[in-house]
């Protein structure tokens, strides 16, 4: 499966949603996750994300491993998002920031 990581938090550009052939994205208030049961590992979303937030599970950067569980868990709680809703208002300012996990809204 592919995994949405910390870089998405407070950005949520949603460009990834446009290209997903199986509607595996689920959206929360300021983050978005991939349902591991639905993702077919096509990887087309990876290049679409302006924040570089999406990785194959086996290629996750160090420290991002906890997002495997978070994607699995939150995709069960959040609704499917199937069209681009545009970025959050301050997305460009938050794009390069790290340490955003505490800002994740559920
Ligand atoms: Fe998030 Fe990137 Fe999609 S910031 S909403 S994973 S385009």
Image (cartoon, rainbow, N blue to C red):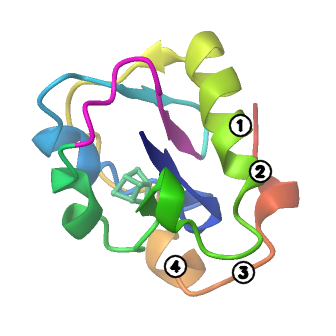
The quarter of the image that holds ligand 1 is: bottom left
Task: State the separation of the CA atoms marked 1 and 3.
Answer: 17 Å
* Disc 4 residue lies near ligand 1 with CB under 8 A: yes
Q: Which residue is mark 3?
A: 98
Marked residue nearer the N-terminal end (1 or 3)? 1
Out of 4 and 90, give the one closest to the viewer: 4
Q: Secondary structure at mark 2?
A: helix
Out of 62 and 34, give the one closest to the viewer: 62
Few, some or many C-alpha atoms within 10 Å of disc 4 (few <14, some 14-19, many ≥20)? many
Marks 2 and 1 close (CB-CB < 8 Å):
yes
Q: Position of residue 58 (x, y in %)?
A: 51, 58
Q: Is residue 77 left or right of residue 101?
A: left
Q: Position of residue 30 (x, y in %)?
A: 60, 46
Few, some or many C-alpha atoms within 10 Å of disc 1 (few <14, some 14-19, many ≥20)? some
Q: Which residue is mark 4?
A: 95
Q: Position of residue 29 (x, y in %)?
A: 61, 36
Mark 3 or 4: the one toward you: 3
Determine the main secondary structure of the stretch shown in magenta: loop
Q: Which residue is mark 2?
A: 66
Q: Residue at x 23, y 24 (%)?
A: 82
Marks 4 and 1 close (CB-CB < 8 Å):
no
């Amino acid at each position: 499966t592919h995994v949405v990581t910390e870089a998405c938090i407070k950005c949520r550009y949603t460009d990834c949603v446009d290209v997903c052939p199986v509607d595996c994205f689920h959206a929360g208030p300021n983050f978005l996750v991939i349902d591991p049961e639905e993702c077919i590992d096509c990887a087309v979303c990876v290049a679409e994300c302006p924040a570089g937030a999406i990785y194959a599970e086996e290629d996750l950067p160090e420290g991002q491993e906890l997002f495997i569980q978070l994607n699995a868990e939150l995709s069960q709680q959040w609704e499917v998002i199937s069209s681009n809703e545009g970025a959050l208002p301050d997305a460009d300012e938050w794009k390069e920031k790290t340490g955003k996990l505490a800002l994740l809204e559920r």
